[in-house]
Image (cartoon, rainbow, N blue to C red):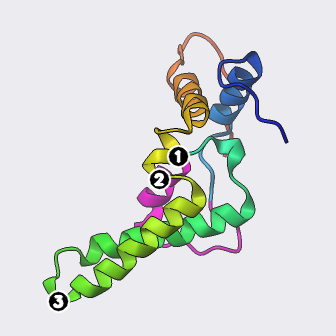
Amino acid sequence: MRQTRSDSAAAAVQAAQNAAQGPLEPPAHVTLPEAARPFWDALMRNRPRHRWNEADLGNAAILAVTQMQVHALIGDVEQAALVDKLTRRIVSLSRLLHVHPEATEGRAQDAGNKLKLEREAEADHDPLIPTLRAVV
């Protein structure tokens, strides 16, 4: 599937649709601990909503749980080897999911522009003008 230009009308419409749908939830087959939820939410905001598929969401859940584990262990000097191992997993999964800094802000400029459009659509809300919002 050919990607649309980030400065096109189609990209602006897609960004508005993504913003209106609200944040992505973990797939039904994935158990995500509540403590991993902030990491999940941050990951979901690092790629345009329409670019996530079921397989990526499963890997994102593993990444969120791993980040949660690292943050829980980071202060324990005796766990340094485990923290190092988990950190390598985080780097690997981040590359796999294209949520690492180079993918979100570096050379993948169009992806970054699409994400920026989505964030602008979320922020561009006048309480006097009705907008599309996800109903949960």
Q: Label 1, on which residue?
A: 103
Q: Residue at x 68, y 40 (%)?
A: 135
Circle 2 Cα neighbour tier, 10 Å, few/some/many (<14 / 14–19 / ≥20): some
Mark 3, mark 2: which one is toward the viewer?
2
**Tag 1–tag 2 contact (CB < 8 Å):** yes
Distance, label 3 to label 1, CA atoms, is: 33 Å
Distance, label 1 to label 2, CA atoms, is: 6 Å
For marks 3 and 1 on the same chain, the one whose residue lies earlier in the sequence: 3
| Residue extent of the magenta highlight | 26-46
Q: Amino acid at mark 2?
A: His
Q: Label 3, on which residue?
A: 78
> Where residue 97 sits: x, y (%)?
59, 59
Count of numbered tags: 3
Q: Quadrant of residue 50?
A: top right
Q: Amino acid at mark 1?
A: Ala
Is 53 in front, or is 133?
A: 53
Determine whether the residue tagged by mark 2 lies in a helix, strand or loop: loop
Q: Amino acid at mark 3?
A: Glu
